């Protein structure tokens, strides 16, 4: 692995440019930039950098999926996740998976850059505001199937269409749907959509 190298993965060019400039100032070399999740995985496989700066939500592959592939192909790469969403579920999932650092985009990204030396030494570092989200991540305990149904309902699919997708009956879908709505305390599809957006599930395709 090359020394002091990084890959920056974010679908917004301005954010990639800003982080690249900050990394350069903090003494680091940007080996590559990626605009989507699949490209991020490819760049990490190619360069095997010391560090990956990873947006939690990008086209083609979610942050948690990219993280898993990075651990597979370049296990020594430190991964710092930054997010524009405040999804306790997603952030908690990444923390449990072992992300080396997690920061929110709404906060000053200089905190992310200044944390890099400690993270490279093996310390797990969370930015201001992330700790509370992680502590709240387990309060709504949806099953994997309920998350599947939630993601598909949020995409506008009917019970029958969801049943066909998941190889279950429409009645079973309706049961899952009713149970998850009670769990998250919503009473309409609009509220379900809002929850799914906060949790980053609108573009998710969950495997059965």
Image: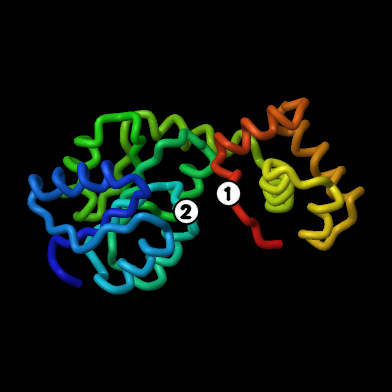
Give the camera-side residue of 190 and 178.
190
Answer with left or right where residue 99 lies relative to residue 65.
left
Disc 2 + disc 1, Cβ < 8 Å: yes
Answer with left or right where residue 106 lies relative to residue 31.
right
- The residues bearing labels 2 and 1 have C-alpha atoms spaced at a distance of 8 Å
Q: Quadrant of residue 186?
A: top right
- Helix, strand or loop at label 1? It is loop
Give the quadrant of the N terminus.
Answer: bottom left
The location of residue 49, given as percent across then percent down, is 23, 65
Q: Residue at x 82, y 62 (%)?
A: 167
- Helix, strand or loop at label 2? It is loop
Q: Residue at x 70, y 29 (%)?
A: 190
The location of residue 59, given as percent across then percent down, is 47, 53
Q: Which residue is mark 2?
A: 59
Q: Residue at x 77, y 26 (%)?
A: 187
Q: Residue at x 46, y 36 (%)?
A: 85
Going from N to C along the chain, the mark reached first, 2 or 1, is 2
Mark 2: few/some/many CA within 10 Å (<14, 14-19, 20+): some
Q: Is residue 3 above or below residue 178?
A: below
The location of residue 47, given as percent across then percent down, is 24, 71
Tell me the colour scheme of the image: rainbow
Q: Which residue is mark 1?
A: 203
């Amino acid at each position: 692995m090359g020394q002091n190298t990084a890959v920056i993965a974010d679908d917004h060019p301005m954010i990639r440019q800003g982080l690249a400039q900050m990394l350069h100032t903090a003494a680091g070399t940007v080996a590559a930039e990626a605009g989507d999740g699949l490209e991020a995985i490819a760049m990490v496989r190619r360069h095997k950098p010391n560090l990956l700066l990873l947006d939690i939500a990008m086209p083609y592959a979610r942050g948690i999926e990219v993280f898993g592939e990075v651990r597979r192909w370049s296990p020594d790469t430190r991964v710092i996740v930054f997010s524009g969403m405040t999804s306790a579920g997603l952030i908690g999932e990444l923390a449990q998976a072992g992300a080396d650092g997690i920061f929110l985009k709404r906060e000053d990204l200089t905190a992310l850059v200044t944390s890099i030396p400690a993270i490279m030494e093996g310390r797990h570092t969370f930015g201001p505001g992330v700790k509370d989200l992680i502590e709240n991540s387990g309060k709504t305990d949806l099953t994997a199937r309920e998350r599947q149904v939630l993601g598909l309902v949020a995409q506008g699919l009917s019970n029958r269409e969801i049943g066909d997708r998941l190889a279950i009956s429409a009645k079973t879908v309706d049961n899952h749907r009713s149970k998850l709505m009670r769990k998250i305390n919503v009473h309409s599809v609009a509220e379900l959509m809002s929850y799914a957006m906060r949790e980053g599930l609108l573009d998710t395709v969950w495997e059965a």
